[in-house]
Amino acid sequence: MRVLLLGGYGVFGARLAELLVRDGHDVCIAGRSLAKARACAAPLGCRAAALDRAAPDAALAAALAGEDAVVDAAGPFQAYGADPYRLARAAMAAGVHYLDLCDDAAFCAGIGALDGQARAAGVCVVSGLSSVPALSSAAVRALAGEDPPLVIDGAILPGNRAPRGLSVMQSILSQAGRPMPLWRGGRWETAPGWSAPAEYALPGGLTRQGWMIGVPDQRLFPAHFGAGAVIFRAGLELGVMRYGLFAFALLRRALPIPVGPPLVRAFKLAADALAPFGTGRGGMAVQVTTAGEVRAWRLLAEDGDGPYIPAVPARALLRRAAPPPGARPALEAITLEEAEAAMADLRVRTERSAAPRAPLFPRALGADFAALPEAVQATHRTADTARWTGRCRVERGRGAWPRLLCALFGFPAAAGDVAVEVSKRADPGGETWERRFGARRFRSRLSLAPDGLRERFGPFSFTIGLRVQDGALHFPVTAGRLGPLRLPRALLPGSEAREYAADGAFHFDVALRAPITGGLMVRYAGRLAPAAPGDPAAPPG
């Protein structure tokens, strides 16, 4: 197959050119600089050409004449201006397949508008044939099979010695500190770019830290896979680079710092100065949580072969005799088996794992969890994020002491009937609950303790001796601390709290009594149901 590779002397384009030549394709490396194209093409024995995607229509048509496919590996795709699909339309007009290595969510999602034209031309137009969303979606399908995924969590974790392209750096820097849409708990929310770090395991016992960043997966996976949450992170191997970028992200939360070429080049100079440190080992991780299991696929690229991975999906698709016509994002454009076959000549190893899913409350209660009504159990099977809404009544104790304690912990004001929303976010260390009563809210952190659960409100933490009795879940307070200091029993609040089912619905009744006096501090009781889901196909912005 004759393949025109735009951006073929870039970090990923050059590696794709090498892989395609290995597969026997007739490759033409193209870009703005003919000298760079020739320098890259000469060792591979392939063609070279000068081409800019902004060239006149006649120049594009001439460059595409006689080619079977064009691959855009240049980018940055978010900076393609008012006519971002100009090259794709030129390819369709020439009867040439169009593929790209885009990692921009809006660009990938928008390519579907060309579907009718692509089918009429009988050509394949696919955007996102890179690590995301092509390889990540292939891994999700292989892991989930026919089981609906509750949570999809992915990460790209390059080694520090991997080369860095200006396009990728501009994409990351432009997102740092700016709000990006996230689908969690069946609803769209926002999070700042390069935030919320988490650890990921890679083959060989290696672990790397990833930070939230926007990729096409967050926008495309919720509707495509029906997942309740989609999370993606990227990492930098060196701590000084990770936390330096975090400092920049914090600054951009407060100040609208523009990310233009001078700033990107300055960051690249700093990153290149640190290139001798760290390793050439890079990885990728995709984790899928189903109702019963947590399943993972992990990849580790050794000896600097990590930058070949974004080129693998395009290589795999071009190995097919006839790419299917139509225009679409690269969701499941290839299978994981095809991707792994396209890595066979690289220094890459992959592994899969599966483990039973173990939410916090089933672990704390053991076999007793199964004795609870289904309506109660359902509220304690949180996978990433769960939201519950309903109505309740709130009573407050009288006197200065109960009022002071309620103010200290942020408990709600008295109300005969008030809307309530409870959001629960689970992570490996426990769950964070936020209760919202009208405009008032308070938050606590729950984690496993040797004798039950530990619930923390700021500097205060309390041990909850969970027990199941008469079909209800009870939350008695058995011990407490203020920081490291153990509270005497006289200073513990009284807790008469339970969750139960009535008429098939979840109910709660929480009464807390003030320490020392034993008088009522606050009582809130009501019912909850799952919150109405949002539209997974309509992210904000």
Image (tube, rainbow, N blue to C red):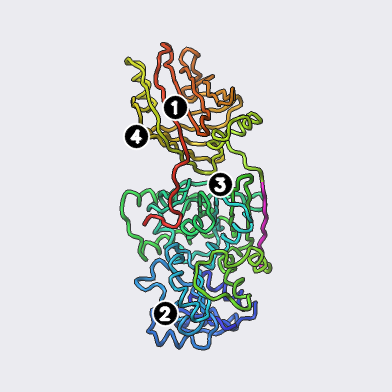
Label 2 crowding class (10 Å Cα cut-off): few <14, some 14-19, many 20+?
some
- Residue at 41 percent across and 86 percent down: it is 59
Magenta residues, start to end = 346-354
Q: Which residue is mark 2?
A: 52
The quadrant in which residue 171 appears is bottom left
The earlier-in-sequence mark between 3 and 4 is 3
Q: Which residue is mark 1?
A: 459
Residue 512 lies left or right of residue 44; in this view the side is left
Q: Is residue 423 above or below residue 365?
A: below
- Looking at the picture, how far across and down is residue 191, in whole percent? 41, 49
Q: Amino acid at mark 2?
A: Asp
Q: CA distance from mark 3 to mark 1?
A: 26 Å
Tell me if label 3 and label 4 are in contact, CB under 8 Å. Answer: no
Q: CA distance from mark 2 to mark 1?
A: 60 Å
The earlier-in-sequence mark between 3 and 2 is 2
- Looking at the picture, how far across and down is residue 101, in whole percent? 51, 69
Q: Which residue is mark 3?
A: 199
Label 1 crowding class (10 Å Cα cut-off): few <14, some 14-19, many 20+?
few
Residue 305 lies left or right of residue 417; in this view the side is right
Q: Which residue is mark 4?
A: 438
- Looking at the picture, how far across and down is residue 91, in whole percent? 47, 81
Label 4 crowding class (10 Å Cα cut-off): few <14, some 14-19, many 20+?
some
Q: Which mark is residue 190?
A: none
The quadrant in which residue 340 appears is bottom right
Q: Secondary structure at mark 4?
A: loop
Q: CA distance from mark 3 to mark 2?
A: 40 Å
Q: Amino acid at mark 1?
A: Pro
